[in-house]
Amino acid sequence: MQGLHTHKIAAFFPPPEFLSMPAAGVDISDTSIKYLDAAYTPAGLVPGMFDSVRLGKGIVENGVVQDVTGLSEALNELHEKHARTFVNASLPEELVYLYTLEVPTTHKDKDILQVIEFSLSEHAPILADNAVFNYDILRRRGPVTDISVTVFPRDIIDGYKEAFEQSGFRVKGFELEAQSIARSIVPVTSDGVSMIIDFGRTRTGITIALGQIPLFSTTVKVGGNALTEAIMKHYNVSEEEADDIKRQQGIAECEDSALQDILMETVTMLVKEIQRHYHYWDTRRDEEGNRIAGIKNIFLCGGAVGLKGLPEQVSSTLQVPVHVADVWGNMFSTDKHIPKIPRVISWQAATTAGLILRDVM
């Protein structure tokens, strides 16, 4: 809670920018790099510039950097456009392992790290000398503390580190993309279990979080590109025009039955994946057979989440409240400040917003 307290104080007494400018957030996927910076103001931590560059095919594949030079050149393009030097960066889910452990509440940090080291071979098929890991405390239950463990392959991180070093950016920290998203869109007051759906261009991330800490994260190869390409082909329109059609008609008001069938095919695939993970987590039992706390809310974010009718489709299938994410909710109040970044664009910025908040929460 200390970080949150500092965040609130900074909102009332904004420090000089050169003294405590928060690190910008940089989110790298197979197809693009997204960048967001922010500044302390009386209204809160207000986003400044949101930018993105497309990545050429083969530079990053399934989360692995294949072309360090190509990635560093794309990062340098952003670095030259924006004044920030320090950044926090996300790592994709594809090659990261996330699991939970119970440790004695009396354990100090070094003891917990030792327990994690002994547990690696059970939970993550990564050689110990190639493993980089961290943990978050989920909750304390008397003599037992539940922790969430994140394990990264060192050689995968090295590819990203090298690209950043060559670009001019200086990385303060790397973290799992799902951690950033949960910090951004799950309200700080939430202490229940949520499901987060990050509906992106080429893939969809599904995360289960307790409060703002991920318990589980996976990626499915269903993305919004399939919808965009179907509309472009059907109407012979540009990508931008296809995106407008998705937002204005989507699956809710599509008047062309043939196109609606095509769109529903992709949406149905996505909803089935969401449903599968939802039912698994919502019906779990502990060792005594008691039902573990179920999923209270589903949050949607990502560049493809603007498809009209998608939230209603997910909600009607699962019979649980579905919210299109308020990406800025943990940074500032829209009662005090209206962001320059349009809401439809903000859904792409969930990861980068969470990376900025990493320094203050």
Image (cartoon, rainbow, N blue to C red):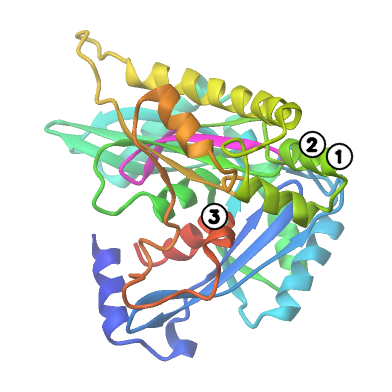
Q: Which quarter of the rendered picture does the C terminus lie within?
A: bottom left
Numbered label attached to residue 233: 1
Closer to us: 260 or 148 = 260
Residue at which label 2 appears: 230
Q: Is residue 46 above or below residue 103?
A: below
For the question of whether residue 158 can be seen, the reply is no
Closer to us: 250 or 172 = 250
Q: Which of the 4 quarters of the picture holds residue 184?
A: bottom left
Q: Give the spatial CA distance, label 1 vs label 2.
A: 5 Å
For the question of whether residue 234 can be seen, the reply is yes
Residue at which label 3 appears: 347
Q: Secondary structure at mark 3?
A: helix
On the image, the x and y values in percent for residue 10 come to: 31, 80
Q: Secondary structure at mark 2?
A: helix
**Residue 350 on the magenta segment:** no
The residue lying at 62 percent from left, 44 percent from top is 249
Specify whether 214 is left or right of 294: right
On the image, the x and y values in percent for residue 292 come to: 25, 21
Q: Residues within 10 Å of mark 1 (few under 14, many from 20)?
A: few
Magenta stretch, residue numbers: 202-216
**Are the two marked residues, 2 and 3, in contact with CB atoms closer than 8 angstroms?**
no
